[in-house]
Amino acid sequence: MKRMILIAGIFLVFIHCNQKDSQTMNNEPTPKLKSLVILWTSSDPEVFNKVVFPYGLNSKKQEWWQEVELLIWGPSTKLLAESAELQEKIKTLQTAGVVLTSCRWCADQYEATETLEKLGIDVKYMGKPLTDYLQSDKRVITF
């Protein structure tokens, strides 16, 4: 029995090594996912300042992702509408090429639609688009 287990283990190691070798021999890079959606829901300004903003900005500037979208959803909508400091940082993200989108239902609930639109944010109903993102090859992270 021990001999069979040893032979099976050697066989699995052999197969694993051959798979890695064939990937290396093809000299084909591992395909990168191209689109990142950052779903920002937190009303905590520290989450934006210490996580969402720097990661979103660097993801675009350092070309970690070809497309970066910041989706403003829920309580983050109110926070952004009320904070001149965060609004300035949003402009920095726009300048870097980050796509800015906000959920219209959320913006309407917080009476923030006009403010967000003046910032150049695309305010639209996002339930279906978010579902599509989650069912696609886009990567969605939530903060």
Image (cartoon, helix red, strand yellow):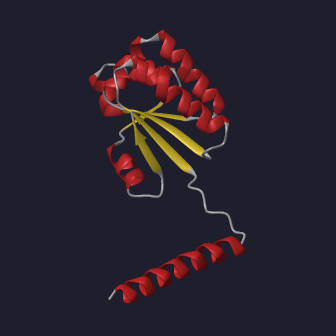
Name the foreground residue: 56 vs 121: 56
Q: Residue furthest left?
A: 109
Note whether 125 is above or below 79 in the view shown.
Answer: below
- Image quadrant assignment for residue 25: bottom right
Residue at (65% x, 31% y) in the render? 96
Residue at (36% x, 41% y) in the render? 126
- Image quadrant assignment for residue 55: top right
Q: Is residue 64 left or right of residue 8?
A: right
Name the foreground residue: 59 vs 18: 18
Name the foreground residue: 94 vs 14: 14
Q: Quadrant of the N terminus?
A: bottom left
Q: Is residue 60 left or right of residue 134?
A: right
Q: Quadrant of the C terminus?
A: top left
Residue at (34% x, 21% y) in the render? 43
Q: Residue furthest front?
A: 2
Q: Count every numbered label the image shows and give the total.
A: 0
Residue at (34% x, 49% y) in the render? 128
**Residue 19: percent from left, percent from top:** 58, 77
Q: Is residue 54 left or right of residue 38?
A: right
**Residue 62: percent from left, percent from top:** 67, 38
Note whether 82 is above or below 132 in the view shown.
Answer: above
**Residue 97: percent from left, percent from top:** 63, 35
